[in-house]
Amino acid sequence: MSSAKIRLCVDQPLRAGQSLPLGEAQAHYLFGVMREAVGARALVFNGRDGEWLAEVTEAGKRKGTLLCLERAREQTSPADLWLLFAPVKKARTDFIVEKAVELGAARLVPVATDYTNSERLRRDKSEAHVREAAEQCGALFLPEVAEMASLTRHLADWPKDRRILWADESAPAGSPAAMLSAAGPGPWAILTGPEGGFSETERTRLRALPFVVPISLGPRILRAETAAIAAMTLWQAHLGDWR
Ligand code: SAM
């Protein structure tokens, strides 16, 4: 195992001898902020080829190059969990994206619901948050950020083998742990609503779908981002990669 502490997410394929030119932001971070120089070691990953040890071969103010040396970790796949979330205010949505990466979601799906305030989500910005979060938390996989679409459209086209764990504050209280263990593993998605919750029309629709499993997250109303974290934590502990 290498002693390199800095992790960088890159786009290029990774193999021994691969040269990795750095963009301006990464060069600034590595040489300006972290004060690294030629000969320093870093870990690199691209979400596909595992994690590699690399060495700085060129260090400039605005550019630099790494040389890929050897694989430090094999690529792994995340547990099969999507997060469907209604975007909320910007900083809180960024927080949801960051925590979803840390908690091992395989796909992030922003949904427009009847009471969603944010009509659009900057996908490029969310993808940048995904990369930063993966660099920081040691993840090897980069979850895809889907295009924002309406909940109605998602439900009309939903893969029927993927159950939806619907965070529903009106669901009867019970033991979510027992319910999840009984429901069993497989492809899952978590669905959380916006600040205003789900409309009555949405609730009626969701309750009628056989692949939707409503879950209470306790007797208090959680903020949307807390609900997303709580539901992902429960799922990972009982059906995901924390077991
Ligand atoms: N204003 C809404 C209401 O009172 O109906 C509350 C919405 S809450 C801030 C945002 C989302 O978090 C909800 O749509 C739901 O998905 C989830 N949530 C919050 N508290 C929850 C709880 N106790 N159980 C299940 N889901 C919860």
Image (spheres, grey):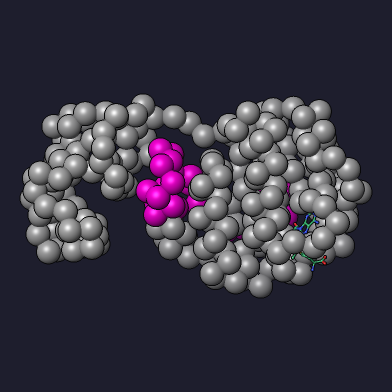
Task: Say whether residue 218 is left or right of residue 42.
Answer: right
Q: Is residue 48 visible?
A: yes
**Which image quarter holds the C terminus?**
top right
Residue 14 pos. (x, y %): 25, 34
Q: Residue at x 62, y 48 (%)?
A: 83
Specify the segment rendered in magenta. 130-155
Task: Say whether residue 32 is left or right of residue 174.
Answer: left
Q: Residue at x 67, y 31 (%)?
A: 239
Q: Is residue 173 above or below residue 129?
A: above
Residue 180 pos. (x, y %): 77, 34
Figure quarter occupied by ligand 1? bottom right
Q: Is residue 206 visible?
A: no
In this view, the residue in front, 20 or 242, is 242
Q: Residue at x 23, y 43 (%)?
A: 42
**Residue 237 shown in magenta:** no
Task: Say whether residue 138 is left or right of residue 239.
Answer: left
